[in-house]
Amino acid sequence: MDSRLRGNDGKMAKTVLILGANRGLGLEFAKQYAGDGFDVIATCRRPAEATELRRMGVRIEALDTSTASSIDALAKKLAAEPIDVMICNAGVYGPRSDGLTDMPTEDFDLVMRTNVLGPLRLTMAFADSVAKSRGAMVFLSSRMGSIATMSSASGIAYRASKAALNAVVKAASLELGKRGVRVMALHPGWVRTDMGGPSATLTPTESVAGMRHVIEKASDLHGGFYDNTGASIPW
């Protein structure tokens, strides 16, 4: 039985699962989708502290994307629910660097575990739920992960992690496309968030509005890497 909510018009509301929604772009995704009547499931590490999400009235679930047991627990809880769009937003920048540099192993491991292993596990955990609705899996990547366009070695750990994430996305598109799941990587642009800083050119509202428009065209953009305007980015 389909447990999704119905809107005022009687139509089944689409379900959006936002992984990493307590701040920044994830929070803005939750705000915009909720405002448009979607059934929003927003995850964060500490739901008790998710004041803004509670104010929106969205469904809040606990999730630590770096922990396999946490991912498995949420997947089991949501197993009966079709998911129309899964947005994997969780990520960290890691050590700031201007070029090639060594770094503590634990710092590098945290970046790779959060930005690569976590999304891979999430892909496998929610593949069945997204396949039920022949929906979309969207992964927030970065132009910094594009090998073809790379012109700087700054933020090497972050760059390496996003290049690896892009490989996961491409592999997932090849496997899950057979089941009707559309998969894409999105570069949000340079956004004024904690990671992007105050000098960035886009507000979270502008970036997310653009990405949502791209997501709506997921059936045409399956298996690719795009920016917030829908322009293709080389791997």
Image (cartoon, rainbow, N blue to C red):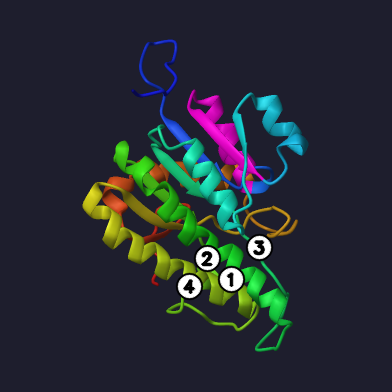
Instruction: Let me know if residue 26 is in the magenta part.
Output: yes
Quote the CA–CA distance across marks 2 and 4.
9 Å
| Span colored in magenta | 25-44
Disc 1, disc 4: CB below 8 Å?
yes
Q: Secondary structure at mark 3?
A: loop
* Marked residue nearer the N-terminal end (1 or 2): 1
Instruction: Determine whether, in the image, residue 23 is placed left or right of residue 40.
Output: right
Position of residue 94 measured from the top left corner of the image (x, y, whole percent): 69, 70
Given the image, on which type of amino acid does mark 4 rest?
Ala
Task: Give the foreground label among 1 and 4.
Answer: 1
Label for residue 92? 3
Given the image, on which type of amino acid does mark 2 rest?
Leu
Quote the CA–CA distance across marks 3 and 1.
9 Å
Given the image, on which type of amino acid does mark 3 rest?
Val
Q: Residue at x 68, y 59 (%)?
A: 196
Label for residue 117? 2
Report the residue marked by disc 1.
112
Report the residue marked by disc 4.
164
Dot 4: within a 10 Å radius of its alpha carbon, few (fewer than 14), some, or many (20 or more) residues?
Answer: some
Front one among 228 and 28 = 28
